Image (cartoon, helix red, strand yellow):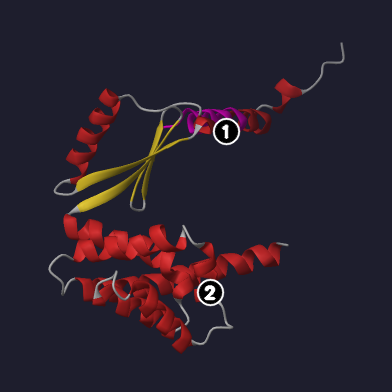
Amino acid sequence: MAESAKHETVMDVTAERLARVYAQAFWGAALKQTDPVAAVDELRSVVTEALDKFPGFETILGSALVDPEGKKQLLDRVFGKQLSPTVLNFLKVLSAHDRLALLRLVVKESKGFVREHLGQVEVDVRVAAPLSDSLESDLMERLRKRAGTKEPILKITVDPEIVGGIIVKVGDRVYDGSLRTRFEMAKRAIIERASDLIETKPDLFMLSDA
């Protein structure tokens, strides 16, 4: 079971790395267009309007029973009049390399290039209960001051398990102000204090003969 989980994790990491390579290539092509952000939105629409709504179509695109040329013709028939040449050609590149299964990850990775292009930074926020408008505005102002020239884009998740407070993740930095973490720290401090007392004053913990 552990080996299986480890294998899946390695596969996930490999897929994410490959997706980022393809996303970078797509973004390079998109930058040659008048509106690169629109190209990413168009690619995302392939997922939301085609793959999500028609799972059978996604199955066909990922099937080993359909050869690359057949998939290319299918992409032309379905998207030939709907997509720009940049997006359609990119789908054909993924198909030719048998990487259409990475499309969702490619779209996800492409969002990072869009944010960088627009001078934005995604901020993951976990709270125990929904934020009021005033608290969300206050948080935005504080984040703007820390982010400098970049505009924070909040991704708020309600997680009752943190009990209270807030956890903010910006890039690789995590600011943990949750009550759950504070409780854990307090508990560890109590245990460490008790351990120190046992080592330095063991007589306090010995039963009396009386």
Q: Is residue 178 magenta?
A: yes
Q: Please report the residue visible at 59 percent of the width from the left and 83 percent of the height from the top.
A: 65
Residue indicated by mark 2: 60
Q: Is residue 84 magenta?
A: no
Amino acid type, callout 2: Ile
User: Is 39 on the left or on the right of 163, as rendered?
Assistant: left
Amino acid type, callout 1: Arg
Magenta stretch: dominant SS?
helix
209 or 7: which is nearer to us? Answer: 7
- For disc 1, the neighbor class at 10 Å (few under 14, some 14 to 19, many from 20) is few
Which disc, if any, is residue 188? Answer: 1
Relative to residue 126, is residue 131 depicted above or below?
Answer: above
Q: Please report the residue visible at 53 percent of the width from the left and 74 percent of the height from the top.
A: 60
Q: Quadrant of the N terminus?
A: bottom right
Quadrant in the picture for residue 26: bottom left
What residue span does the magenta drawing correspond to?
A: 177-191
Q: Secondary structure at mark 1?
A: helix
Quadrant in the picture for residue 147: top left
Quadrant in the picture for residue 155: top left
Image location (x, y in percent) of residue 90: 32, 77
User: Is 55 on the left or on the right of 49, as rendered?
Assistant: right
Image location (x, y in percent) of residue 148: 16, 46
